[in-house]
């Protein structure tokens, strides 16, 4: 241990305080964490809730490092030992910033992201990208080695890496969904700010790269839980473009003619989905907005994307409005009177992590979107795969910062990066406010509002947990760098963030996911080989979506129409009270990067996703025609079922429509599918415990899927797919 401590102290950069062992706090295993320059701004900068993935010096300062803290408090600066970073005050070509450590299942290596370089002189504009690195030599006295991960996307920011069960790497990137450079960067649906495009999977050995899911507004912080699921936070913002609301168009929004490299700006600013953000005067359609960061899950192959355990707004939000105002059956959602089990609302689930001692128990941060650097209240909930979402209850670990509309005297500060250790204790990055938001200094002499320090947690007198002893005595440093026209100067503590425990764990075996029984019955009935069918889908970059009964909706969802009938077919419920809605078509929309920003004459680089009626050539050809239906639609069969070919690796959404094409029930989230995926759901909104008629989730073998397989098998035999939907 003395040898390791000596190496650590010798590796300390100039201006960094040498630490004594923080003996007051012992941990069962070492902890990796990072230090970061305390950037004052909290919009699209490092540590912000969204758009925190970019590496330029105006967004993430230089001078931070990757540290390991042993159980007795001894520290090692791993990046400095490995020769990374500027040891002096001035940060230039070798300057670094680091983020997102994640430990391998073996416990003997870890991933992290690092950006290298800063301007060497004033007015020198440089672009730098976060890239994935792997570190070994984590034991006391070991020689540290840091290696850049091979075959990762270049000219893209690759962050928030995690090891899959097989050792491949799942990570967040802003690489365009199809790799086309003219689409870079993708802009989010809210602020039209650069955003990650989703989760990606890389095999560093052979360079195989897979888009696991496509996120129009970004995905964040993937982890592999003890059940082998990929859990992550996703920004859900499927609404119309708020920057397109003004008739005078101050943001210069417009539509490109397509996603293609040779597309051109057009005068078109139209949007087709969902309903408008603001209700028109006299309209029966209520305005619709959505804005939250929910927990999501996929399998490690990218299939079966959905909110964690199918948790949604009805289980987690406190209020939202109805879709139509002329139907007294439809009511505003108010959690207190909804009949749900969960008594405590939560809106954002940031920096999600699992309790290693309690499989399926998770902690996260519910933080506001701005002004706190993604720090807020620690929340906890149990959601193993077997738990019905109706039975998930949110617990408040730390006290909310407000009580009603007033600040709470029990508020103990702002928290981020919660970590439950293998002995059950909890640590987190904690900060108290350091003055008000208007006293942040300036670009040259920044003064961040918060000072994040890693602390262990203890139970306070009010029964909630709060920050206790610090894990370090503070990591201070003096640095300067060009930003690029202003010389930034800072002396003080760096943020301590993103702790992870260095311990070996058994890699979970991903659960098997065979084609569900009702859909297998359809394959058997039609004599179609599932393997051959899925091979066809992969060859054409397609998936198939099966909805067993779209007249069936969860019993709590009374905000969209639920007295639904297929003309001359299924009706749920069978004896409704009030208006009955006929539904005849399911219309699909694909997320196209066609929204331009900044004016047609000189648009900003990149695109925003916009919902467009399904026009993917392969999917449209295989779905065939739908007489009388709106563009991009398939018919709803008499049993309420829907089956459709859909493009893979692209965000999709949908809505039921009346026979005349008028929207009835709209999907509220984007979903993406993998090539070859056969995805089935019981209905729309899916049933948790009972539907609106007191029935369980549909398990029928759908007429729509039987028809699709029948048509496909005939076409496969002739190798010419029919264009008839008859």
Image (cartoon, helix red, strand yellow):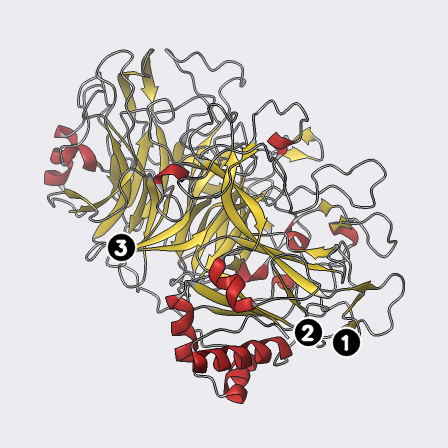
- State whether residue 73 appears in this view: no
Reading the image, the residue beneath label 2 is: 637
**Residue at 50% from the left image edge and 52% from the top image edge:** 651
Q: Is residue 627 left or right of residue 77?
A: right
Q: Badge 2, how many Cα within 10 Å: few under 14, some, many 20+? A: many
Reading the image, the residue beneath label 1 is: 569
SS at badge 1: loop
Earlier sequence position, callout 3 versus callout 2:
3
Residue 473, above or below 308: above
Q: Badge 3, how many Cα within 10 Å: few under 14, some, many 20+? A: many
Per the model, the C-alpha gap separating discs 2 and 1 is 8 Å
Residue 259: image location, x then y, percent: 46, 43
**Residue at 14% from the left image edge and 42% from the top image edge:** 144
Q: Quadrant of residue 381?
A: bottom right
Reading the image, the residue beneath label 3 is: 104
**Residue at 39% from the left image edge and 64% from the top image edge:** 228
Q: Are marks 2 and 1 in contact (CB under 8 Å)?
A: yes
Earlier sequence position, callout 1 versus callout 3:
3
Residue 410: image location, x then y, percent: 61, 34
SS at badge 3: loop
Residue 661, above or below 148: below
Residue 678: image location, x then y, percent: 49, 71
**Nearest the eye: 27 or 188:** 188
**Nearest the eye: 331 or 173:** 173
Earlier sequence position, callout 2 versus callout 1:
1
**Nearest the eye: 226 or 333:** 333
- State whether residue 575 appears in this view: yes
Residue 522: image location, x then y, percent: 55, 83
């Amino acid at each position: 241990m003395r040898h390791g401590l000596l190496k650590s102290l010798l590796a300390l950069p100039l201006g960094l305080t040498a630490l004594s062992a923080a003996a007051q706090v012992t941990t069962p295993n070492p902890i990796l964490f990072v230090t970061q320059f305390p950037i004052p701004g909290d919009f699209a900068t490092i540590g912000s809730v969204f758009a925190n993935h970019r590496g330029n010096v105006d967004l993430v300062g230089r001078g931070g490092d990757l540290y390991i803290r042993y159980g007795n408090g001894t520290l090692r600066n791993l990046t400095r030992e490995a020769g990374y970073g500027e040891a002096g005050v001035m940060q230039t070509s070798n300057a670094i910033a680091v983020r997102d450590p994640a430990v391998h299942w073996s416990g003997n290596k870890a991933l992290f992201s690092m950006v290298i370089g800063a301007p060497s002189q004033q007015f020198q504009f440089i672009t730098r990208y976060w890239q994935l690195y792997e570190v070994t030599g984590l034991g006391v006295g070991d020689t540290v080695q840091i290696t850049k991960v091979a075959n990762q996307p270049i000219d893209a920011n690759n962050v928030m890496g995690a090891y899959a069960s097989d050792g491949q790497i799942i990570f967040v990137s802003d690489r365009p969904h199809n790799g086309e450079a003219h689409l870079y960067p993708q802009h989010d649906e809210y602020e039209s700010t650069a955003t990650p495009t989703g989760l990606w999977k890389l095999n560093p050995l052979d360079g195989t790269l897979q888009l696991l899911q496509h996120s129009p507004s970004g995905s964040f912080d993937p982890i592999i839980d003890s059940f082998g699921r990929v859990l992550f936070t996703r920004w859900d913002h499927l609404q119309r473009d708020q920057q397109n609301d003004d008739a005078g168009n101050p943001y210069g929004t417009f539509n490109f003619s397509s996603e293609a490299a040779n597309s051109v700006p057009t005068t078109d600013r139209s949007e087709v989905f969902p309903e408008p953000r603001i209700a028109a005067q006299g309209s029966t359609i209520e305005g619709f907005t959505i804005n939250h960061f929910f927990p999501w899950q996929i399998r490690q192959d990218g299939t079966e994307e959905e909110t964690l355990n199918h948790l949604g707004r009805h289980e987690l939000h406190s209020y939202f409005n109805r879709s139509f105002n002329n139907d007294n059956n439809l009511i505003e959602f108010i959690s207190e009177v909804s009949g749900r089990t969960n008594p405590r609302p939560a809106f954002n689930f940031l920096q999600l992590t699992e309790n290693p001692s309690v499989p399926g128990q998770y902690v996260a941060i519910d933080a506001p979107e701005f002004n706190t650097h993604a720090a807020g209240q620690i929340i906890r909930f149990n959601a193993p795969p077997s738990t019905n979402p109706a039975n998930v209850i949110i617990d408040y670990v730390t006290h909310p910062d407000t009580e009603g509309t007033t600040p709470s005297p029990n508020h103990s500060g702002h928290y981020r990066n919660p970590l439950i250790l293998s002995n059950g204790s909890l640590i987190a990055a904690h900060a108290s406010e350091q003055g008000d938001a208007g006293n942040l200094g300036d670009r040259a002499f920044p003064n961040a509002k918060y000072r994040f320090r890693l602390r262990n947690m203890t139970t306070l007198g009010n029964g909630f947990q709060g920050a206790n002893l610090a894990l370090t005595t503070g990591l201070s440093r003096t640095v300067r760098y060009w930003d690029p026209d202003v010389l930034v100067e800072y002396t003080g503590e760096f943020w301590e963030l993103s702790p992870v425990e260095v311990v070996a764990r058994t890699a979970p075996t991903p659960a098997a996911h065979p084609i569900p029984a009702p859909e297998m019955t359809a394959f058997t009935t039609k004599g179609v080989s599932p393997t051959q069918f899925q091979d066809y889908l992969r060859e054409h970059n397609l998936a198939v979506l099966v909805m067993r009964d779209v007249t069936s909706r969860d019993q709590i969802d009374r905000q969209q129409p639920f007295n639904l009938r297929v003309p001359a077919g299924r009706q749920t419920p069978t004896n409704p009270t009030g208006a009955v809605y006929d539904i005849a078509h399911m219309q699909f929309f694909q997320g196209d990067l066609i929204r331009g920003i900044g004016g047609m004459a000189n648009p900003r680089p990149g695109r925003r996703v916009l919902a467009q009626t399904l026009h993917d050539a392969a999917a449209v050809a295989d779905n065939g025609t739908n007489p009388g239906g709106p563009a991009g639609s398939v018919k709803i069969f008499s049993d309420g079922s829907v089956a459709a070919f859909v493009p893979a690796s692209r965000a999709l959404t949908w809505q039921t429509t009346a026979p005349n094409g008028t929207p009835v029930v709209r999907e509220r989230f984007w979903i993406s599918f993998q090539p070859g995926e056969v995805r089935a759901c019981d209905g729309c909104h899916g049933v948790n415990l009972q539907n609106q008629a007191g029935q369980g989730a549909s398990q029928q073998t759908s007429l729509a899927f039987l028809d699709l397989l029948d048509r496909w098998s005939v076409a496969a035999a002739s190798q010419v797919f029919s264009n008839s939907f008859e």
